[in-house]
């Protein structure tokens, strides 16, 4: 008998091995195949028998575009919040119906701690103007919670008050707390062009995106500018999106790592039901086991490749995909 989804809420964060991941993934797949009307119909159209699925590469991945027009919901829990992508002018935003906001909080809290340690060791300075200016942003919910969890009076959001941010960064240089400056790409670039700062002892993390404010840069160009102006050796990155409840992180050079309950597969762009080996470029498919009550198996419009150690790179987008917020822009 498959475990109930409430039991899986705890088990996914205790994953230690590939076997643990496979067991949880198959349990969530069978739950969603039976209890998610959109996903169930999609599986039927593909003529996939859920009972015959025994491996990760046999699981159908739902195209991420479905989140633009349909409510992707598994089970009968009422929706507590709807996250909405920023999109661009004229594009249709994605909507993620989240049944349990606490599950999202557990995922991003544990994910941050997995890669960076206790949030209480940090001062979080968030430069996210495009997100603060709208509602329904999953990134704002995450960063606001991390700011509160840091329990640091210097932590906070910055909109257009750049001089206050610069003064705060200079003030924090000599203090013992770790400083994390987290920002959307265009805002970090604006800050770097206006102020040359020595942030060699701070973590600079970009969440991607020019949001139509500036010309797109390839990651290497963006990171080189930020490193030179902030006098730091590497720029960290966060890879997340409205349709996910988990995030991957890069400590530099655009090489991302996922938490144990999230996995990346690379699909063949000419045959979306087949998958590629390491170092081959294809479409990024994501298994996010925290998406118990929506869909944990998503085929994104990002292009990338994985390495033998399961780290991955994001190399671009399909030409016909919309530019979306809360996702690394190249």
Image: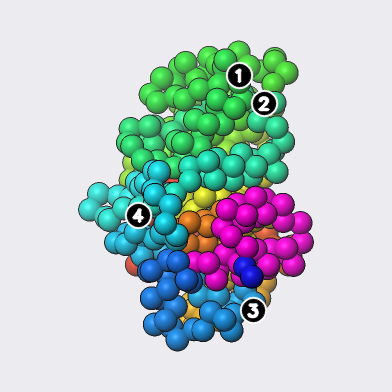
CA gap, disc 1 to disc 4? 33 Å
Q: Earlier in the sequence, mark 2 or mark 4?
A: 4
Q: Residue at x 53, y 41 (%)?
A: 102
Residue that label 4 marks: 94
Q: Earlier in the sequence, mark 2 or mark 1?
A: 2
Q: Nearer the viewer, mark 3 or mark 2?
A: 3
Residue 246 in percent (x, y) is at 56, 50
For the record, the magenta segment spans 3-32
Q: Nearer the viewer, residue 173 or 87?
A: 87
Mark 2: secondary structure: helix
Residue that label 1 marks: 152
Q: Is residue 73 above or below residue 110?
A: below
CA gap, disc 4 to disc 3? 30 Å
Residue 14 in percent (x, y) is at 72, 52
Residue that label 2 marks: 120
Query: Is 214 displayed left or right of 35 in the figure?
Result: left
Mark 3: secondary structure: loop
Residue that label 3 marks: 54
CA gap, disc 3 to disc 1? 47 Å
Which class describes the residues within 10 Å of circle 3: few (<14), some (14-19), or many (20+)?
Answer: few
Q: Earlier in the sequence, mark 4 or mark 3?
A: 3
Q: Earlier in the sequence, mark 1 or mark 4?
A: 4
CA gap, disc 2 to disc 1? 8 Å
């Amino acid at each position: 008998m498959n475990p109930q989804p409430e039991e899986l809420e705890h088990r996914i964060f205790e994953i230690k091995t590939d076997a643990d991941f496979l067991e949880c993934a198959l349990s969530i797949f069978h739950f969603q195949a039976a209890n998610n009307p959109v996903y169930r119909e999609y599986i039927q159209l593909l003529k996939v028998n859920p009972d015959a699925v025994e491996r990760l590469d046999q699981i159908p991945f739902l195209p991420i575009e479905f989140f633009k027009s349909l409510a992707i919901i598994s089970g009968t829990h009422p929706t507590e919040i709807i996250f909405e992508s920023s999109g661009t002018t004229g594009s249709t935003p994605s909507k993620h119906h989240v049944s349990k906001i606490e599950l999202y909080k557990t995922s991003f809290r544990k994910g941050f701690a997995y890669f960076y340690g206790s949030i209480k060791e940090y001062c979080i300075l968030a430069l996210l103007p495009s997100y603060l200016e709208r509602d329904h942003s999953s990134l704002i919910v995450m960063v606001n919670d991390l700011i509160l969890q840091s329990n640091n009076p210097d932590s906070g959001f910055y909109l257009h008050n750049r001089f206050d941010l610069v003064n705060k960064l200079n003030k924090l240089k000599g203090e013992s707390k770790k400083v994390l400056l987290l920002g959307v790409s265009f805002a970090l670039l604006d800050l770097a062009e206006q102020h040359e700062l020595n942030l060699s002892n701070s973590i600079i993390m970009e969440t991607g995106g020019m949001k139509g404010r500036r010309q797109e840069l390839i990651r290497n160009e963006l990171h080189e500018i930020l490193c030179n102006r902030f006098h730091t050796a590497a720029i960290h990155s966060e890879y997340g999106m409205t349709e996910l409840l988990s995030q991957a992180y890069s400590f530099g050079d655009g090489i991302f790592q996922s938490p144990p309950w999230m996995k990346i597969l690379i699909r063949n762009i000419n045959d979306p039901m087949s998958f590629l080996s390491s170092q081959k470029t294809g479409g990024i498919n994501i298994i996010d086991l925290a998406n118990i009550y929506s869909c944990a198996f998503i085929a994104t419009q990002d292009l990338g490749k994985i390495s033998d150690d399961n780290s991955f790179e994001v190399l671009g987008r399909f030409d016909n995909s919309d530019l979306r917020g809360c996702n690394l822009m190249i």
